[in-house]
Image (tube, grey):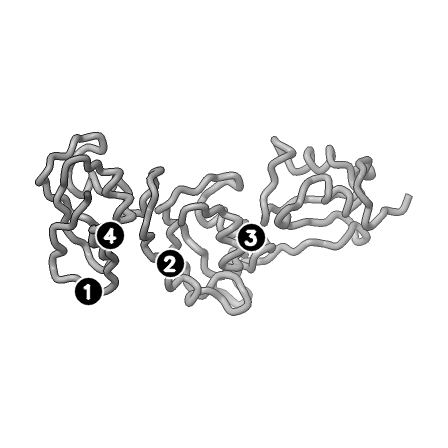
């Protein structure tokens, strides 16, 4: 059975008793190893990444622990990212929403966000009402990037709301000073010429092709899409009037003039 040696200094804050194991998340502490322990098991108990636990204690991830060995538990470590069950997840990101813009989007300053289990760029964008495209650009990621628990990403300042895309930043503002990000929104149809479209949740290239009455192959070619089954919310697509008309089986919402 896992047991807690003591927390140093005295614990302040939430304390939970788990099958005889006292778990407190307020401050760093120490833990005394018992028979059968591993870094992964201890990491799961305290919701601390095993690799960081090893680094904190200057030992290897695969090292065999000895009963009586004292380990430092640092809550500066990322969240546990193994396959064991975490009984008491740590609370993180409690103050993220306070720094976001009213009505959605990023706030006046960039805000750090620690990835939780099951998070994706899209789920974070939806939860915080922040543009997925802005998250991708601010963190140098790809649209299909798989996020890891404990990974820290930045919620960029001035990011548009979910479903929009930060297109570019002017090099200088009018009258001097820095520019501000411009926001790309979706044109309804091609009645005014070539258009841009910001991909939404559950969109497919076929549904977009049907909306604009353009052939999917042309969308793929014009936007240099390598895998037509993989588009992501917030991605900006160019839709050109020069494309052939849609030839799929979906309903064409805005048929083009012949």
Secondary element at image label 3: strand
N-terminal label among 1 and 2? 1
Secondary element at image label 1: loop
Where's the N terminus, which quadrant?
top left
Q: Mark 3 points at which residue?
A: 168
Secondary element at image label 4: loop
N-terminal label among 2 and 3? 2
Tell me, for residue 93, which label it has, or none: 2
Q: Which residue: 50% across, 40% down?
A: 142
User: Which mark's residue is nearer the viewer, 2 or 3?
Assistant: 2
Q: Mark 1 points at which residue?
A: 12
* Mark 2 vs mark 3, CA separation in Å: 28 Å
N-terminal label among 4 and 3? 4
**Residue 256, how many percent across, how many down?**
85, 46
Pointer 2: residues within 10 angstroms few (<14), some, or many (20+)? Answer: few
Tell me, for residue 112, which label it has, or none: none
Query: In the rendered image, is residue 172 in sight?
Result: no
Q: Which residue: 52% across, 54% down?
A: 125
Q: Mark 4 points at which residue?
A: 75
Q: Which residue: 68% across, 49% down?
A: 197
Front residue of 116 and 174: 116
Front residue of 189 and 87: 87
User: Which mark's residue is nearer the viewer, 4 or 3?
Assistant: 4
Q: Which residue: 49% across, 59% down?
A: 128
Image-based side of 69 in relation to 117, left or right: left
Image-based side of 203 in relation to 194, left or right: left
Kindly give the residue lying farthest to the right in the view shown: 258
User: Which mark's residue is nearer the viewer, 1 or 3?
Assistant: 1
* Mark 1 vs mark 3, CA separation in Å: 46 Å
**Residue 208, how many percent across, how many down?**
72, 44
Image-based side of 92 in relation to 198, left or right: left
* Mark 1 vs mark 2, CA separation in Å: 20 Å
């Amino acid at each position: 059975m896992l047991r807690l040696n003591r927390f140093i200094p005295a614990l302040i804050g939430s304390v939970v008793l788990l099958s005889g194991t006292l778990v407190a998340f307020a401050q760093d502490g120490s833990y005394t190893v018992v028979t059968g322990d591993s870094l992964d098991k201890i990491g799961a108990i305290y919701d601390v990444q095993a690799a960081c636990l090893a680094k904190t204690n200057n030992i290897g991830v695969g090292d065999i622990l000895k009963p009586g060995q004292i380990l430092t538990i640092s809550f500066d470590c990322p969240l546990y990212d193994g396959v064991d069950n975490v009984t008491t997840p740590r609370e993180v990101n409690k103050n993220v929403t306070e720094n976001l813009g009213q009505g959605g989007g990023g706030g006046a300053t960039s805000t750090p966000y620690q990835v939780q289990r099951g998070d994706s760029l899209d789920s974070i964008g939806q939860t915080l009402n922040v543009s997925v495209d802005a998250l991708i650009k601010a963190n140098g990621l790809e649209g299909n990037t798989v996020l890891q628990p404990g990974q820290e990403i930045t919620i960029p300042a001035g990011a548009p709301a979910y479903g929009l895309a930060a297109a570019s930043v002017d090099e200088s503002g009018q009258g001097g000073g820095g520019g501000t990000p411009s926001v790309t929104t979706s044109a309804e149809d091609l009645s005014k010429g070539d258009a841009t479209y910001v991909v939404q949740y559950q969109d497919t290239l076929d549904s977009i092709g049907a909306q604009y009455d353009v052939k999917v192959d042309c969308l793929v070619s014009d936007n240099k899409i390598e895998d037509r089954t993989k588009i992501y919310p917030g991605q900006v697509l160019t839709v050109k009037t020069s494309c052939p008309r849609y030839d799929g089986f979906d309903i064409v919402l805005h048929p083009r003039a012949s």
